[in-house]
Amino acid sequence: MVRPYLTELDAAPYPPKFKAPTLLTFDGKRLPSQHIYYKFQIRNVVSNYAIMAHLFIGTLKGVAFEWFMKLPAGSIKTWADLEKLLLARFFKDDIEISVPTFLAIMKKKGESIKLFVERLRSMALRCPNGMMQFTLVDTCHHNL
């Protein structure tokens, strides 16, 4: 099997008594920058970037994993390579939005209320100064 990362990643030894942290998976639908934050979560556990990259690869699921497996052999040599490639592919949805843009978000035709609320919450996180809960609820109510 051809792998997009160097085989040295598989050969990196784990520290004695190492226990991998429980990590959320990334399926290409959430914000990639949130998932890359994982690097900071385990920095206190392991400082070996080869191990970090190997563990991170194990969190990729669905379209994210399919994308990863299609990368050219040897295209990932470092953690920075993995981060750069992931953000380049999935970053398009990871942008800040203005409050007026947020307030104009409407429920899409055929979209369930649950999915609309989830999308609205996700968009609220992209506002530079966050969003007051009252504003979020009010926007949801008026934009259904």
Image (cartoon, rainbow, N blue to C red):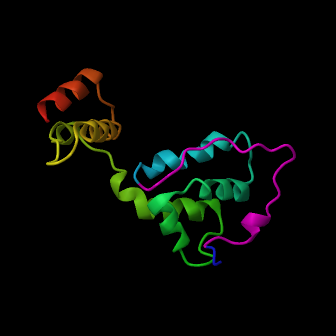
The number of callouts visible is 0
Question: In what quadrant of the picture does the C terminus appear?
Answer: top left
- Vertical placement of residue 12 versus 69, above or below: above
Q: Which is more toward the observer, 99 or 28?
A: 28
**Magenta part, dominant SS:** loop
Q: Quadrant of residue 60?
A: bottom right
Question: In what quadrant of the picture does the N terminus appear?
Answer: bottom right
Q: In which quarter of the image is residue 137?
A: top left
- Vertical placement of residue 134 versus 18, above or below: above
Q: Which residue is drawn at 25% across and 28% down?
A: 136
Tell me where the magenta segment starts and ends, as one range. 4-28
Q: Which residue is drawn at 72% across and 45% down?
A: 20
Q: Position of residue 23 (x, y in %)?
A: 60, 44
Q: Indicate whether residue 19 is drawn in magenta.
A: yes
97 sits left or right of 34 in the view: left
Q: Which is more toward the observer, 107 or 50?
A: 107
- Vertical placement of residue 28 versus 130, above or below: below
Q: Indicate whether residue 60 is drawn in magenta.
A: no
Q: Position of residue 134 (x, y in %)?
A: 24, 21
- Vertical placement of residue 132 versus 109, above or below: above
78 sits left or right of 33 in the view: right
Q: Residue at x 62, y 40 (%)?
A: 41
Q: Residue at x 29, y 24 (%)?
A: 132
* Residue farthest along the right direction in this orientation: 16
